[in-house]
Amino acid sequence: EVQLVESGGGLVQPGGSLRLSCGASGFTFRTYSMHWVRQAPGKGLEYVSAINDNGGSTYYASSVKGRFTISRDNSRNTLYLQMGGLKTEDMAVYYCARGVGSGSYLDYWGQGTLVIVSS
Amino acid sequence: QSALPQPASLSGSPGQSITISCTGTSFDVGGYNFVSWYQQHPGKAPKLIIYDVSKRPSGVSNRFSGSKSGNTASLTISGLQAEDEADYYCSSYTSSTTFWVFGGGTKLTVL
């Protein structure tokens, strides 16, 4: 059974940093692209970042470029999102998801981890 | 990249059919067959229900169907059921940012 479990969310002050993790199991992690998607309270979904299967290519939404860094450790079946320079508008539930196919549709999602940015 | 426009809300009665539209441009919806749709119930993670415009993942009811005409993608739900009440999001790859974009979401109410 495919499972994605996010962790690392919590309360952080504006300007602070946080690292999210996503542990994967039930599939060959190193053969799939992985994505981070977020959802602010009461709002819609927003793509945040993506990384290809071997970690050689990364993608970022313009809203986080230069502040967030996506990475993966295929030996540990774990995806990461290092977040810096956090703003109140970054407050959201962050989901990791598995990407499949040329269009990278997201076929499995984690349960999400909440990031609260507040002083 | 702004969210792809979707109707904010729709409603229908059990047994009826409804169609949710997702309007893009030639840089996203119209230019690629990489449109997917997600269903999200309150407090839950999104669930993939349509990918590559019209394909259904295993286990998804055949009451859900997808299509595309020009720059507009559509999700049709036939034979509405109470459990279909949820938020629905389209998504597409976009060459304008070489990334992906979601629609703004449509809240479906089953009366």
Image (spheres, coloured by chain):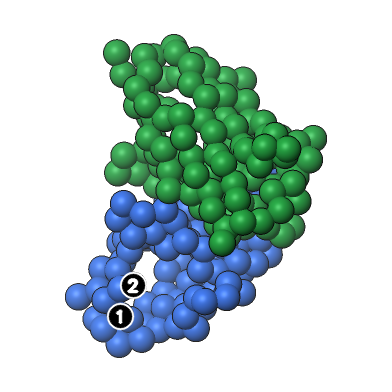
Chain colours: A green, B blue
Q: Residue at x 41, y 78 (%)?
A: B77
Query: What is the x, y in percent for residue B72?
Result: 55, 65
**Above or below A45: residue A117:** above
Q: Secondary structure at mark 2?
A: helix
Please tell me in which quadrant of the rendered image residue A48 appears. Answer: top right
User: Which amino acid, mark 1?
Assistant: Gln
Query: What is the x, y in percent for residue B31?
Result: 70, 59
Q: Label 1 neighbourhood size at 10 Å, few (<14), some (14-19), many (20+)?
A: some
Q: Secondary structure at mark 1?
A: loop
Residue B55 located left or right of residue A42: right
**What residue is disc 1 on?**
B81
Number of disc labels:
2
Q: Residue at x 57, y 30 (%)?
A: A81
Chain for numbered disc 2: B
Q: Is residue B69 visible?
A: no
Residue A73 located left or right of residue A114: right
**Above or below B17: residue A35:** above
Chain for numbered disc 1: B
**Above or below B111: residue A61:** above
Query: What is the x, y in percent for residue B69?
Result: 60, 72
Q: Residue at x 52, y 17 (%)?
A: A84
- In the depicted view, which residue is nearer to us: A41 or B91? A41
**What residue is disc 2 on?**
B84
Instruction: State which quarter of the image contains the N terminus of chain B.
Output: top right
Disc 2, disc 1: CB below 8 Å? yes
- Residue B21's disc is none
